[in-house]
Amino acid sequence: MGGVLAAAVALARVIHSVATRGSAGLFNDFYDYWAAGVLLNRGQDPYDIAALHAVQRAAGLQVETGGGYSYPLVFAHLLRPLALMAAPKAAFIFMGLSLIALCGAIALLLGSIPHLRWPVALGGGAVAGLFPPVIGSLYFGQANLLVLLLLALAYRCVAPIKLYPVTGFLAALTERPPRWRRLVIGLSLLAVLLLPQLGAGSGSIAGRAGSFLGPDTYWTNESINGWLSRLGIASTWTRPPLPGLPVEPFMLAVVAILAGLTVAVLRRAAPRPWEGALALSLWLGVVAAPKNSLWNFTPLLLCVVFIWTTVRGRWWIVAIGACGWILLEVQAQLDSARATVYQSSPALAWLSSVGLYGALIIGAVTAFVLLRPNR
């Protein structure tokens, strides 16, 4: 019930966005997947950006190709049947699959709530459908909702799936004693999924790994990488308040600090629930992964569900977490007005990472609940 409502609300928000703001960007990211599948069907390299762009242009698609296809090769292989269809038709089918995955994921996550009643199920479904990263994933055609279903399975301990982000393995590594069975099964599955990558050309993810760590000021980048990049380097929409800031060393330092704090919380919070440990581990990957867009923050729903199911009436904690949620929504609205909102002052560049600040608040509340579950 809650899952169906979440899908309906998210779809309604997407339709409202198209009706009020136009369809610019609709399915933009899916068309990268689709073009990669087309190239595979032709026996070509899906990581060839020029070839990818040529396929999109030949199909009459107006998209921002950016860095091209930058996902594991196995995903492009799975999409090869959709690449046999016209791009718009394939995009709507992919949206339908994403909505089905969202239904399943929310049903699993809500099922973790003890003594779940239908008002809570309906309320939780509506709230999940309004989560800005969920709406963005559906609008741009990102794979995050399919990934969310896998993460929801892991959250309920139905299967030890920890594929994205890879930091999900921290939850098992820091258990006392470590759950080696979970790690072995999870790593084995990850290895199988990445096996096709061995035959990829020099343009593959491995061949371009270094570029992911470099500065990136693009407006969708809500990771630590994007935050520091826009503070130190001019971008299309922002002026740097801290020009000359050494982005890469600062980024590595901030990520290292957050990783150390996360591991410390996971180690100290014993005994700790698996759900909270997995949620916090995934939170680290979400904010630390370079060039991560706002809609890639979808796994934060695990943190939201964990906080909600654990606080048991301590509404001041819920209120703090809600502030993080609100900042994610604020970021979505700022992104819509990016052509004007940041122009008058370099100081306004700080607002271009409001979504990251919201994610940091949600992560801090998750860590607090893990450390002090009964207080």
Image: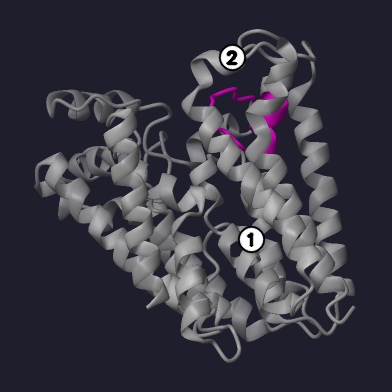
Front residue of this view, candidates 200 and 316: 316
Colour pattern of the rendering: one colour
Task: Check disc 1: other Cα within 10 Å, few if <14, some if 14-19, many if 20+.
Answer: many
Picture quarter with the C terminus? bottom right
Residue occupying the far top of the picture: 344
> Residue at (79%, 56%) from the top-left corner?
364
Mark sitting earlier along the chain (1/2):
2
Residue 69 in which image quadrant: top left
Residue 147, position as x, y percentages in the image: 44, 61
Find residue 276 and report its image quarter. bottom right
Q: Residue at x 87, y 72 (%)?
A: 371
Name the residue nearer the viewer: 340 or 140: 340
In the rendered view of the protein, which quadrant contains the N terminus?
bottom left
Camera-side residue of 113 and 32? 113
On the image, numbered disc 2 is attached to which residue?
A: 235
- Residue type highlighted by circle 2: Ser
Q: Which mark is residue 282?
A: 1
The region drawn magenta spans 215-229
Instruction: Give the left or right position of residue 321, taking residue 290 as reference.
Output: right
Q: How many marks?
A: 2
Q: Main secondary structure of the magenta part?
A: loop
Q: Residue at x 54, y 87 (%)?
A: 116
In the rendered image, residue 109, in percent from the top left (x then y), is placed at 52, 76
Are there few (<14), some (14-19), or many (20+) residues within 10 Å of tag 2? some
Q: Is residue 220 magenta?
A: yes
117 lies left or right of 14 = right
- Assign a secondary structure to mark 1: helix
Vertical relation: 50 (above or below) 259: above
Q: Can I make out residue 42 in this image?
A: no
